[in-house]
Image: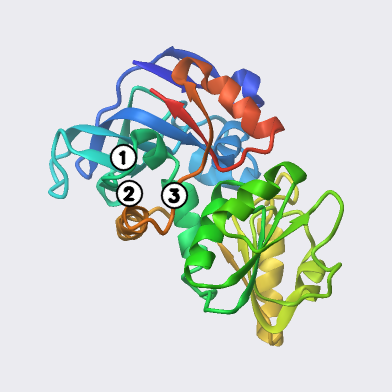
Amino acid sequence: MKAIAQDSYGTVDRLELRDVERPVPKDNEVLVQVHAAGVDPSILHLMTGKPYIARLALGPRKPKNPVRGWDLSGVIETVGAKVTRFEPGQEVFGSGDGSLAQYACAKADKLAPKPDNLTFEQAAALPVSGVTAYQALSGKARPEPGQKILVIGASGGVGSYAVQLAVAQKAEVTAVCGPAGADFVRALGATHVIDYTTGEITDSKQLFDIILDTAGNRPLSLLRRALAPKGVLVMVGGEGGGDWVGGMGRQLGGYVLSPCLGQTLSSVIARVRHEDLLALKELAENGTITPAIDRTYPLDEAVTAIKHLETGHPRGKIVVTV
């Protein structure tokens, strides 16, 4: 089968479209014929093997699985011996290791039936980013009507879902993005927009009940100045920081400080789960969230898609069609 693969960690130039063996599902997995795959920053971590601490799971010297990608949507080809939740021919979406390929294996507990009202491309844009936003705003941070919510990185994959989820709870959302994303985030429901190229989140002296930071490039001290005395900060993922621990160092600092403060400094490293995918399926089908797709690329241009992610500022998600 055709797949986007790499033999060693490094830049996007290490990636290539080539023939690899079709994977065989384990007892708790299914084999999915991939129709579309999402492209998000997690692929850059897979590609570079950074932060280095991630290699404990990815492979210390080279990738355990050379095929890149997580997000997918498609049709189940075969099911493992212990899988009872799904059957061949069923349309699904979720997370599977090596989704930038014609076929990928996925654990049954990381899949759900595809939302009826979404295309395969839209469904592939939903799993990792959608679950991340959902978990970030359903844990310690739960938007309530009238609360003031700041979403940093609002025009990206996670941010675009977070804006929609907060607006659905009738919160007042301020979105932080570049100038090209302003109209986009307003269309998602943001009331106010901060252009990070000309202003900072502390300029207006506005204090926020919840700050969701998906960018990872602001120090805790700055974020805390924009946070209400009893507010909740949620740091998403491991962006920013150095090569060894990335943004996890800042997150650990938040956990150390939080018990000493009235503010809650928390973080989310999302795990795609069947029950959360079912929640997203319902939210998509009732119109609460709609996947925003920046561009789609065919599989043979997936390397170009990853370069666009690396050098551009996508509005929503990038999707590869297979």
Q: Which secondary structure lies at badge 3?
A: loop
- State which quarter of the image contains the C terminus: top left
Say whether residue 155 is visible.
no
The amino acid marked with disc number 2 is: Lys
Image: 5 above or below 72: above
Residue type at mark 1: give it. Answer: Ala
Q: Which residue is mark 1?
A: 106
Mark 3 is surrounded, within 10 Å at the Cα level, by few (under 14), some (14 to 19) or many (20 or more) other residues, namely many
Looking at the picture, how far across and down is residue 92, in whole percent?
A: 27, 41
Q: Nearer the viewer, mark 1 or mark 3?
A: 3
Q: Identify the mark nearer the N-term, 1 or 3.
A: 1
Camera-side residue of 184 and 36: 184
Please determine whether, in this image, residue 17 is positioned above or below residue 226.
above
Q: Residue 20's image quarter?
A: top left
Q: Are marks 1 and 2 in contact (CB under 8 Å)?
A: yes
Of 272 and 21, which appears nearest the observer?
272
Instruction: Name the amino acid type tagged 3.
Output: Thr
Whole-angstrom CA distance, mark 2 to mark 3, is 20 Å
Instruction: Report the side of 47 relative to 197 (left or right).
Output: left
Q: Is residue 76 left or right of residue 145?
A: left
Residue carrying label 3: 290
Looking at the rendered image, the disc whose residue lies closer to the viewer, 2 or 3, is 3
Residue named by callout 2: 110
Where is 7 relative to 249, above or below? above
